[in-house]
Image: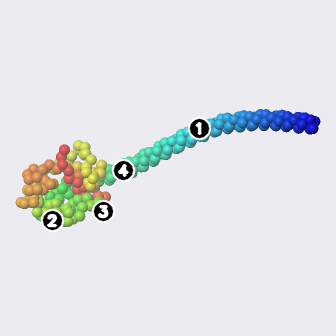
């Protein structure tokens, strides 16, 4: 009986010892696993931080590239506008040169200043006689969608201007300022300063916006029409 008890006691001691060693071994393994996990986590954090820095650098590079592309697009757009403006200036200069050559050729063939002044004299004559349609034809006829209608032209003079008398016509050689939109001036036009004695009609004539009662000094621009081979009035302006 004593032997049995001793055997059971030693067996229990052995079991406790083995169990205790197992717990110690399990604890050491868990500590190793935890340490391994901590090392892996630290390594992953370093890798993630490095990847974040690379991503940030790539985003900055991409932003810089996009900024450069936008800047190049703006410069390209400005260059296109400059090129378009240069083309327009070239066409305008070419048109002006052509017009001037036509005027020079006309003057070379017809050295008679009185011929150039004729539209002004005819205009005054027709206004005085009430022939507004003929007076309308002394004006330069441009594009159909730009020219003033005969009705509008007539309404500016009929029952407003009683008479127009030309006192003097002289060639105007000073510079002409840019006129309001609507005038058809060209750099090849010839300009005359004309002194007019104007009599306004009673009533509405006193509120005339083109002329005043008495002496008026105006600049008449004349333009040569190559198709009709005639001079026309292209604008009447104030003397500055």
Q: Say which label, 2 or 3, has the lower sequence index.
A: 2
Q: Give the CA separation, mark 2 to mark 1.
A: 83 Å
Q: Give the CA separation, mark 2 to mark 4.
A: 36 Å
Secondary structure beneath dot 3 equals loop
- Depth order, front residue of 170/74: 74
Name the residue tied to disc 4. 92
User: Mark 2 or mark 3, which is nearer to you?
Assistant: 3
User: Mark 1 or mark 3, which is nearer to you?
Assistant: 1
Residue drawn at the location 25% of the way across and 46% of the way down: 176
Q: Say which label, 4 or 1, has the lower sequence index.
A: 1
Residue 225 on image: x %, y %: 29, 58
Secondary structure beneath dot 1 equals helix
Name the residue tied to disc 2. 131
Q: Say which label, 2 or 1, has the lower sequence index.
A: 1
- Depth order, front residue of 59/184: 59
Q: Residues within 10 Å of mark 2 (few under 14, many from 20)?
A: some
């Amino acid at each position: 009986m004593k032997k049995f008890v001793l055997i059971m006691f030693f067996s229990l001691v052995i079991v406790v010892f083995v169990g205790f060693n197992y717990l110690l071994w399990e604890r050491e393994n868990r500590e190793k696993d935890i340490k391994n996990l901590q090392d892996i986590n630290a390594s992953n954090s370093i890798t993630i931080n490095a990847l974040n820095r690379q991503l940030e650098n790539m985003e900055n590079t991409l932003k810089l590239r996009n900024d450069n592309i936008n800047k190049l697009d703006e410069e390209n757009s400005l260059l296109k506008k400059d090129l378009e403006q240069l083309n327009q200036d070239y066409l305008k200069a070419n048109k002006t040169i052509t017009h001037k050559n036509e005027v020079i050729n006309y003057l070379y063939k017809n050295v008679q200043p009185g011929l150039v002044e004729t539209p002004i004299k005819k205009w005054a004559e027709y206004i005085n006689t009430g022939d507004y349609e003929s007076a309308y034809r002394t004006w330069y006829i441009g594009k159909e969608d730009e020219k003033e209608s005969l009705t509008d032209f007539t309404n500016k003079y009929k029952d407003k201007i009683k008479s127009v008398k030309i006192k003097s016509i002289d060639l105007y050689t000073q510079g002409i300022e840019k006129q309001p939109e609507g005038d058809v001036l060209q750099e090849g036009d010839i300009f005359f300063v004309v002194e007019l004695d104007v009599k306004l009609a009673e009533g509405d004539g006193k509120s005339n916006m083109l002329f005043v009662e008495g002496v008026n000094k105006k600049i008449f621009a004349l333009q040569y029409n190559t198709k009709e081979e005639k001079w026309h009035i292209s604008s009447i302006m104030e003397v500055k």
